[in-house]
Amino acid sequence: MRILAITTLLLFGILATSAQAAVPFLNATCPGGIEVHADAGGPVYVNGKEARLKTFNANYYETTYQRTTISISVNPDGSSAVSYTARGGANGVCTMGVSNGDPAAAPSSGLTASQMVAYCKGEASGQYNTRPRNVTASQPMRGTNGGFVVTGSVSLGAQGNPPFQCLFDGSGSFQSIDWL
């Protein structure tokens, strides 16, 4: 009887812990025009449609939209990060902040230097439908407009190595990818 009572208490403890796991409020924009919005505790919307959310633990969630997996993670400081993995191996970091014109969700700054490189590689690999490992990209440099520039190329074998540059504004927010 004592073992049954202990087992029951452990089971209730596990259920109570998993019930506390809740997706945070966030807005993000991913390459390919994918807008992600989550209310605190859910639901999660992708391009305005409610998405089915898979909870792995209190700090990690995933949903799928048109063969693209969107990952939501909660950092130890409580901030959120959103990334994507698309068909063909394209992947990268989504820009956190304004979604559907919601200025209250605007971040105080954009991407870090390493996130700019990852985002740029994700954009290029997605446009050429190739894996990010086939894309090389430099560290960000200050551009003439006060923003940042990441340059690189895509290795397409016999098709060549088209060069590109990704432009970010002064706060590190992605602006565009230009093919050179």
Image (spheres, rainbow, N blue to C red):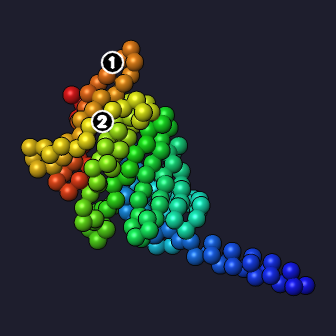
The residue at which mark 1 appears reads as 160
In this view of the protein, can residue 38 be seen by the observer? no
* Residue displayed at 13% across by 43% down: 143
Tell me the SS state at disc 1: loop
Using the rendered view, name the quadrant where residue 144 is placed: top left
Q: Residues within 10 Å of mark 1 (few under 14, many from 20)?
A: few
Residue 82: x percent and y percent?
42, 56
21 versus 65 height, above or below: below
Q: Residue furthest left?
A: 144
The amino acid type, in three-letter code, at marker 2 is: Ala
Q: Are marks 1 and 2 in contact (CB under 8 Å)?
A: no
Tell me the SS state at disc 2: strand
Q: Residues within 10 Å of mark 2 (few under 14, many from 20)?
A: many
87 versus 23 height, above or below: above
* Residue displayed at 30% across by 36% down: 137
The residue at which mark 2 appears reads as 137
- Looking at the picture, tell me which residue is in the foreground, 47 or 10: 10
Residue 101: x percent and y percent?
28, 63
N-terminal-most mark, 1 or 2:
2
